[in-house]
Structure formats: C-alpha cells, structure tokens
Image: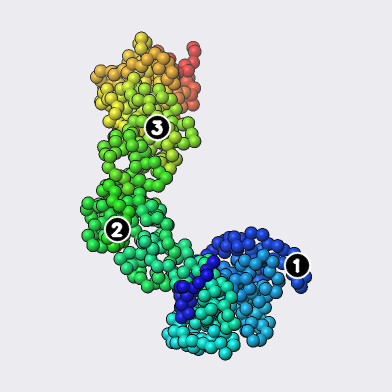
C-alpha cells in the first residue's frame, strides 16, 4: 500500500479515456476481483439484525431504467450479482467499471469489507447523500446508487448543468468542508477530474498526501486521494497505458496493430499469426486508437514503410515476396498492404522466401497455388510424385485466404490406394476427383498396380472427391476401354456389360498396354481351349468356330488367356451361338435371323413371337455382318426338312399350301430350335 502519493496531480486525477473505458473488465473478471479481495465473509447479523452479506455474494432484484442522453437504460432482472450490476451499468453509461469499484471502496469500503452492514449497500456510493444533508430517498439501494452515480458522472462531464469545476480553467478548491481550512488554485485538465470534484469537492492537503492511506491533520480530506490510491494500486495508472514496446494493443476484445501512425484492426482470421510474431497485446484505450489514422483490417501482407520490402507474416516470421506477381498469386496486390515502420517490420525476424506452396492450420496436406486453383497434395510423397519440390517453404494460409481460390480434389501418389480415417474400406483416388472402391486387391494385381496403401487419410482431404464406380478389370483411359489381365491391358470394343472405372491420365500412364487395337474380348483359361466372350455382364462359352467368326469378323481372333483359377472365378452365362438365332450389328442396328451363313431380316419382333423364339439378339461385328449375304425377310411360313409350317403365337402347324405367303427356308440347325409338330 502507498505511503506517499508522488504521482498524484490534483488537476488531472484520472484521464477522460481511462474514466470512460467501459471495456476494461468483463462481468467474470469483476466477480473474480471481488472473490480475491474477501477470502472469507464473516456473515451473521449486523447491528440492525439484518443479514451480513459480503459484496462478492451480494445479489438483488434490479428495476428497469429508461435510456436518455447519459445512459442507454437498464432492463431489470431478478437475482443479479453485484458484479453483474456493475458491469451492465458500466456498459449502459460508458463508465469504466474500475471507477465504480474504486468508488465503492472509498465510500463504504465494500470491496474489502468482511462484515458489511446492510445500510452500507443502501448508500454504497454516497450518491444523493451530501455531506451536510440527509440522503435523497430516490437513490437509496445498491442498484440505484450504482446506476445513479454512473449517470451522474456523465451529467458532470457533459458540463451543461455543472460548470464551476469545468476543465481548461483554474479553480480554488477547498481542502476540507470547513472553510477555515482554506483552498488552493487547481488547473483542472479534463472532464473526468472535474466530475470527481463535483462528486467530492475537496482536494487532499499536504498532510493527507504525506499520509498515503493514513490520517493527515484536522484539515485533511481523503475522498479524491483515496480514489487515486485504490485505482493505481489495483488497476495501474489513471492516465492510461502508453504505447507498449511492441505494436499490438487491445481495447477489450478488439485487437489492433499500431504502427507508422496507423491503427489496423486485427481480425480473428489473422490474429494467430500476429500473436506468433509479436506476442500478446497490451491494453490501451479507445481514445488512443481514435487519435490514430484508421488503416482498416490488418492483413498478413506487410510492407516496410522505409525499404518498401513486401513480406508475408507466417509462423512467427516475415517472409519476403520476390515479386508482386507472387503477391497477386497469394490473393493480394502490392497496392493493398499493411504498412509497418521499419522497427516493427523487423521485430519478428525474417524467415524463408515466399513460394507458391502453402499449408493450413490443422491440415496435414501441402497446397500449391496454380492460377485460380489451390491444389492440395495428400502427403509429401504425393507432392514429390507430382513434381513439387518439398524443400521449398510453405507459408500458412488463412481460411479467408483459401476461400479466394477454387477448391481442387486432393492429389495423391498416382496408382496408390488409401483408406479414410474411421474406415477400413480401400479406395483408388484419382486426380480428377474420383474414389473407386477396391473390393479386392486382385484388381490391383491384374492392373499391374503395386499394393501400397496410405492409411487413415482425413475425411476433409477427400471432401472434393466423388465415390463413383468400383474398381474393376475394365478401365477407361482417355475414353478407351481396356480389360486387365496379369498386369497387362487389352483394348476392347466393349466392356461386355461389365462396370468400367474411368481412370485419370496419371494412373493410366502407370499401366502396361498389351494391345491398343479395339476388338471383341475373348478369353480362355490356361490349358483350356474353350473360348468365352464377355457379354451381358457374364462370360459365355462360344459354341463353335462359326460363331467365333461371326462374333469376331474377318481377321485374326485375339484370345486373352487367364490363369485357370482366374477363369474359373469369372461369372458365366449360357452358351453363345451366332450361326443360328437372331443377331444384330452395331453399324446396321437391325435384327436378322442368322441361318447357314446368310442373314434373313426380321422386320418385327412379332414374327419372333409367332415362331416361338425369344426376343434376344447376339451382337456380331459389322465386318461379320457385311460378309454374310442378305436373304429376304422372316415370314410366318417356314420350310423345315422339306415340310411347310405355318407359325402363329408360338405354335407351328403343318400345311401344304402357303396361301400366298412367302416361304422362309431354314437350315436344320435353326429348325432344331423350333417346336415343330410331329407327324
């Protein structure tokens, strides 16, 4: 505690900025302050048999007060604590809550009192209680005292109704209520000091100043002396805080960078980087901020006001931009920078030079700026695989900065598999944003990809990916469809009804192409001459050489040989014949009845229904179709083994006269597929 008041200035007891800084304490901080001043309340009953309650535990029901030119008003509430009342009144009346706290102490000792009588709360601040008359009943009660005193201070500072201690003039101010104790001239410097004199119209004499907190002489008055003592002991200087050693300050929750005569508001998006570079802020006042040029929102793009060096603030250092083009790549420009004076600019120290590489807080990926795209790489190995230099510096980009770019799917090592955190499912990711589910690593073996898995990839890393087709033996590269077998790809004219996984160019480049000529897919098992064709999502045994020729067309037949076990595992369908029954070619699109090396046109599936044949057609090559002559149109009168039959609704009847209907001559092979009547 003070024994002298060496810094006391009767004309400037407290500055206007400190007196009206309502943001110095939160409600919780006020409550904590009260708790720290009274470790144990004695309780019990006072001299009037009323309960003794210490300030830290005091609660009451408040009433509503209308807003006016001095305070914004108050909405009454039940069971409010003293801390809450003080905080709310401070906000409503633009008074520093520390001022109200100090006044409670100097008037009734309520901050430190361990057994305060109830009457102390009723006249807590002496508001409406002159030294020479009873208290005004309108101000009785703790809430009325706090609200009334705070509002009265604003009335005093307005200077409209109270002018005899007006700032900017010298006034003779008494030492004591006894006029015989005398007075001395005081040059009142500001409104806050004049308000204190309106409230307590005495200055401390020399004896009071020498005594510190103690007793002076018979002419001493202690109100304004004690206000100064308690405030400076508990809260620091009454004149505000001078500019701190570093450039970062705060007014309540608002944080600013003050440099080069300008205040820049530091938002939450960039605060982490400023804190890493400059440390915690030092408190200042709104008046201090208001006295400076307003630079708007602080950015991470700093410029030395003397050297014009442009740098980015990241990881506690400044990082120089070699060109303004790179500044533009990072979403800013050399005409929109936060200008620091040289001392502040150099304070964090210089780090590595800026590049197009970036990182994000809480994200393991590395990002690369590519024009308007921000391309993420899942791992350092992925970045290297895509030609990025892992030794280049990656500065931390803010979420706000990242939002300026187009989001691109994460790039992984081409051809490598991943699992997503929280799941055991394996996927093949592609650079174009696909995730192909891998039901078996057999597919990787057939495609010739190494079975290498990056596990537990964050879900956010694949948020831009689409889960589409499962990985299969049929893949599409640049629109071309291939069948994979034993690490080699064979180009096919059709997937035969099997699913096709569209693979990006980077992955396709890893695959070995065995034959890049499109042809029908025929396979057999090792050591087995039986040939199968992929059609309708199954493999069907090709019945005979004629069918094979019809399906393949002129030229050599390509058969891909699979391991015996692999062939046995493939889904199988019914035997496939193209030398009989209905066929269709892709180029023509019309359906024909194949019969003894010729094609008979089927002009309606109704004719098939009449013959009792299924509405199914086997696809044969255009070349095979072109090689077979056309032989009329299928009719409802057919000749089988020299006997005429009339067909209707699947039933065939022997006739002797075709009655003007053209006769369709059928080979024994086709006749064998009909339900011919017996003689």
Q: Secondary structure at mark 3?
A: strand
630 in relation to 330, above or below: above
Say which residue appears at 36% left-offset and 38% top-offset. 378
Q: Position of residue 520 (x, y in %)?
A: 31, 23
39 in relation to 358, above or below: below
- Is the image coloured rainbow, by chain, by secondary structure, or in one colour? rainbow
Quadrant location, the N terminus:
bottom right
Label 3 Cα neighbours within 10 Å, binned few <14 / some 14-19 / many ≥20: some
Check disc 3 and report the residue beneath it.
454
Check disc 1 and report the residue beneath it.
45
Q: Earlier in the sequence, mark 1 or mark 3?
A: 1
Asked if the residues shown at circle 2 and circle 3 are in contact, with their CB atoms under 8 angstroms apart, the answer is no
Foreground disc of the pair 1, 3: 1
Q: Position of residue 464 (x, y in %)?
A: 40, 43
Q: Position of residue 530 (x, y in %)?
A: 37, 13
The CA span between labels 2 and 1 is: 62 Å
Q: Nearer the viewer, residue 146 or 52?
A: 52
Q: Secondary structure at mark 2?
A: helix
| Corner quadrant of residue 109 | bottom right
Q: Is residue 217 visible?
A: yes
Say which residue appears at 29% left-offset and 44% top-offset. 393
Foreground disc of the pair 2, 3: 2
Q: Earlier in the sequence, mark 2 or mark 1?
A: 1
Say which residue appears at 40% left-offset and 32% top-offset. 454
């Amino acid at each position: 505690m003070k024994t002298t008041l060496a810094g006391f200035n009767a004309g400037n007891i407290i500055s206007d900025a400190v007196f009206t800084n309502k943001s110095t304490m939160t409600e919780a901080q006020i409550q904590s302050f009260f708790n720290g001043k009274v470790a144990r309340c004695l309780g019990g009953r006072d001299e009037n048999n009323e309960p003794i309650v210490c300030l830290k535990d005091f609660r009451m029901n408040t009433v509503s007060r209308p807003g006016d030119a001095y305070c914004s008003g108050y909405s009454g509430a039940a069971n409010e604590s003293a801390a809450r009342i003080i905080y709310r009144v401070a906000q409503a009346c633009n008074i520093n809550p520390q001022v109200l706290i100090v006044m409670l102490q100097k008037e009734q000792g309520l901050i430190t009192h361990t057994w305060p009588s109830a009457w102390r709360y009723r006249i807590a601040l002496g508001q409406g209680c002159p030294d020479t008359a009873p208290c005004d009943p309108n101000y009785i009660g703790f809430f009325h005292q706090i609200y009334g005193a705070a509002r009265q201070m604003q009335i005093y500072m307005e200077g409209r109704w109270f002018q005899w201690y007006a700032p900017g003039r010298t006034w003779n101010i008494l030492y004591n209520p006894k006029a015989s104790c005398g007075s001395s001239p005081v040059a009142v410097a500001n409104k806050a000091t004049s308000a204190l004199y309106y409230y307590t119209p005495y200055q401390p004499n020399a004896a009071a100043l020498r005594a510190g907190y103690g007793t002076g002489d018979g002419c001493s008055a202690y109100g304004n002396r004690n206000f100064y003592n308690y405030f400076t002991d508990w809260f620091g200087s009454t004149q505000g805080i001078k500019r701190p050693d570093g450039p970062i300050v705060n007014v309540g929750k608002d944080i600013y960078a003050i440099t080069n005569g300008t205040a820049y508001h530091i938002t939450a998006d960039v605060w982490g980087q400023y804190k890493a570079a400059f440390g915690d802020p030092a408190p200042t006042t709104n008046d201090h901020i208001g006295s400076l040029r307003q630079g708007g929102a602080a950015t991470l793009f700093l410029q030395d006001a003397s050297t014009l060096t442009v740098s980015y603030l990241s990881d506690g250092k400044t990082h120089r931009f070699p060109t303004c083009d790179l500044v533009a790549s990072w979403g800013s420009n050399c005409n929109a920078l936060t200008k620091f004076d040289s001392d502040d600019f150099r304070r964090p120290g210089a780090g590595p030079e800026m590049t197009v590489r970036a990182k994000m807080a809480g994200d393991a990926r590395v990002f690369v700026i590519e024009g308007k795209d921000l391309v993420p790489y899942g791992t350092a190995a992925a970045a290297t695989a895509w030609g990025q230099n892992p030794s280049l510096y990656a500065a931390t980009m803010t979420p706000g900065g990242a939002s300026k770019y187009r989001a691109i799917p994460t790039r992984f090592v081409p051809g490598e598999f991943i699992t997503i955190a929280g799941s055991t499912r394996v996927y093949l990711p592609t650079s174009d944003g696909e995730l192909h589910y891998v039901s078996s690593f057999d597919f990787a073996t057939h495609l010739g990809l190494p079975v290498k898995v990056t596990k537990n990839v964050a879900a956010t890393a694949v948020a831009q990916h689409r889960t589409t087709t499962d990985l299969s033996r049929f893949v599409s590269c640049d629109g071309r469809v291939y069948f994979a077998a034993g690490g080699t790809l064979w180009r096919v004219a059709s997937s035969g009804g099997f699913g096709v996984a569209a693979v990006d160019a980077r992955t396709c480049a890893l695959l070995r192409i065995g034959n890049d000529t499109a042809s029908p897919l025929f396979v057999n098992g090792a050591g087995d001459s039986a040939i199968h064709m992929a059609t309708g999502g199954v493999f069907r045994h090709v019945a005979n050489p004629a069918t094979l020729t019809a399906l393949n067309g002129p030229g050599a037949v390509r058969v891909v040989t699979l391991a015996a076990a692999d062939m046995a595992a493939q889904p199988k369908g019914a035997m496939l014949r193209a030398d009989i029954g209905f066929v269709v070619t892709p180029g023509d699109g019309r359906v024909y009845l194949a019969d003894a090396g010729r094609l008979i046109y089927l002009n309606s599936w109704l004719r098939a229904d009449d013959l009792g044949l299924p509405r199914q057609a086997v696809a044969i090559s255009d070349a095979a179709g072109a090689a077979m002559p056309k032989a009329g149109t299928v009719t409802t009168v057919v000749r089988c083994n020299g006997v005429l039959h009339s067909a209707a609704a699947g039933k065939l009847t022997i006739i002797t006269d075709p009655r003007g209907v053209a006769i369709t001559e059928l080979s024994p092979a086709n006749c064998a597929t009909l339900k011919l009547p017996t003689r």
